[in-house]
Amino acid sequence: MGGQLTSWDTVIIGGGFYGCALAVFLRQNGYKAVILEASEDLMQRASYVNQARIHNGYHYPRSFITAWRSLVNFPRFTLEFRECVDNSFEKIYAIARRGSKVNAYQFKEFCRNIGAPIHPAPPPVKRLFNTALIEEVFTVREFAFNAAVLRDLMRDKLTRLDVPMRFQTEVHHIEQADGDTLNVTLSTGESIRTQAVFNCTYAQINTVLQNSGLPMLPMKHEITELALIEPPPELRELGITVMDGAFFSTMPFPAAGLHSLSHVRYTPHESWADLVNGYRNPYAYLAELDIQTHATYMIHDSQRYLPALSKARYVRSLYEVKTVLLKNETDDGRPILCREHYGLKNLYLVMGGKIDNIYDVLKYLQQFAQPIDQEMVEAPHDQS
Ligand SMILES: Cc1cc2nc3c(=O)[nH]c(=O)nc-3n(C[C@H](O)[C@H](O)[C@H](O)COP(=O)(O)OP(=O)(O)OC[C@H]3O[C@@H](n4cnc5c(N)ncnc54)[C@H](O)[C@@H]3O)c2cc1C
């Protein structure tokens, strides 16, 4: 949808999963909203290029709250977006003997404490692992999502609700206009007046803030590589995660009909924190990089634990900027970030560290005027 922009109740910057879900929420609550999206379609960036894991808590033994919220949100997400859910594979978590931040006993106890189902893996699955390096292997309940199907679902919802979407429309900056209204200026120079703005641009949140002369948030950006592989037959119906340290994960990436392979050491190519190392425009930086794939390193290291991976066929890699709050670097937690009236009246910032966090964001927005579950929200003035 294109054409002249006039004035809208609410402008949502970014048509990723968060911007789309927020637009649906606002429309259903009686607000007029428009989505302004820099690329040519919805959900082309982090909402497509990710591991496709629908978290159910297992991934976060060092962040109880994130684990517990994943567990709470899992049934809701898998029901509401069931058409995109891939549960056709067995999900395996294996604990490394050395270098792991949790051992098998601690992992089992952690799962029991949060109430996440866990069972010893059957012998044929266990036999796939090198027992000299792997202490224990478990089957768990975790699924994947098909990002292309999720995008179609969101597009259908937005179309049914008559939410205008404008593509190839990059917002440059925001400024206060008269009273409580805001002016949103596009990279083309065109500008629109609006009642409220939601900055849902994930890796680009700080870029929009910087261009608007507003303080940036303490965020860390990583240039990440997700290798797509054709797994050997014995791994085809498995999703495997080796925990919890510099290990790896290989699981279905349904949107491409392949498996992803990611490795804690080799998936990140480089990283920076805007407030520590200086600001960079993440998309522009990624676009300029001449990246050499780390897929061979990923396969070589991972096959020590899972020998069948030596027969995997590397197909291609997807690269994207992964953005986390600086304070979660060590505990790996993924709280939501929601800020209201950030530097400007009626400017809101929204970032969810993972797809299913959307329900925590919506809960936050629903209870705007009331005290909310503060533990899930990043401390507003925490600059650590
Ligand atoms: C490598 C990787 C692996 C991950 N693995 C998982 C996982 O397994 N499970 C999980 O739940 N989560 C995972 N995540 C996190 C998850 O992908 C994100 O939490 C989620 O996609 C964020 O959605 P979003 O809508 O905020 O961001 P995005 O999908 O990135 O959307 C932001 C949108 O804003 C647009 N935009 C940017 N700047 C502008 C501008 N100035 N004007 C207009 N539009 C603009 C972009 O084009 C983009 O469409 C992973 C992330 C990465 C990068």
Image (tube, rainbow, N blue to C red):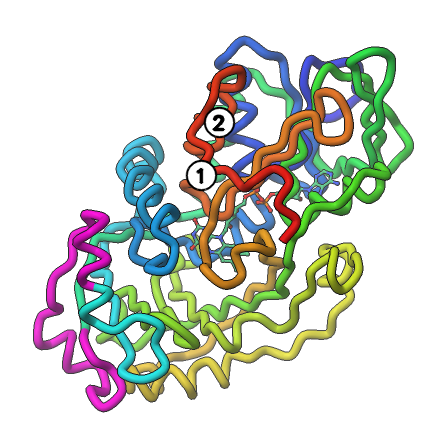
Which part of the image, by quadrant, shows the N terminus?
top right
Q: Residue furthest right?
A: 189
The residue shown at (15%, 74%) is 125
The residue shown at (49%, 32%) is 361
SS label for mark 1 = helix
Q: Which mark is residue 376?
A: 1
Residue 237 x, y percent position in the rendering: 23, 65
- In the visual, does 260 lie left or right of 381? left
Instruction: Tell me the CA gap for discs 2 and 1.
Output: 9 Å
The residue shown at (83%, 33%) is 186
Magenta residues, start to end? 108-136
Q: Quadrant of residue 278?
A: bottom right
Q: Residue furthest top?
A: 30
- In the visual, does 35 lie left or right of 229? right
**Kind of residue at disc 1:** Met
Residue 173 x, y percent position in the rendering: 83, 35
Q: Which residue is mark 2?
A: 364
Q: Is residue 219 above or below residue 369?
A: below
Residue 95 x, y percent position in the rendering: 26, 74
Q: Are marks 2 and 1 in contact (CB under 8 Å)?
A: yes
Crowd tier of the residue under label 1, counting other residues whose Cα lies within 10 Å: few below 14, some 14–19, many 20 or above = some
Residue 135 part of the magenta segment? yes
Q: Is residue 241 above or below residue 157?
A: below
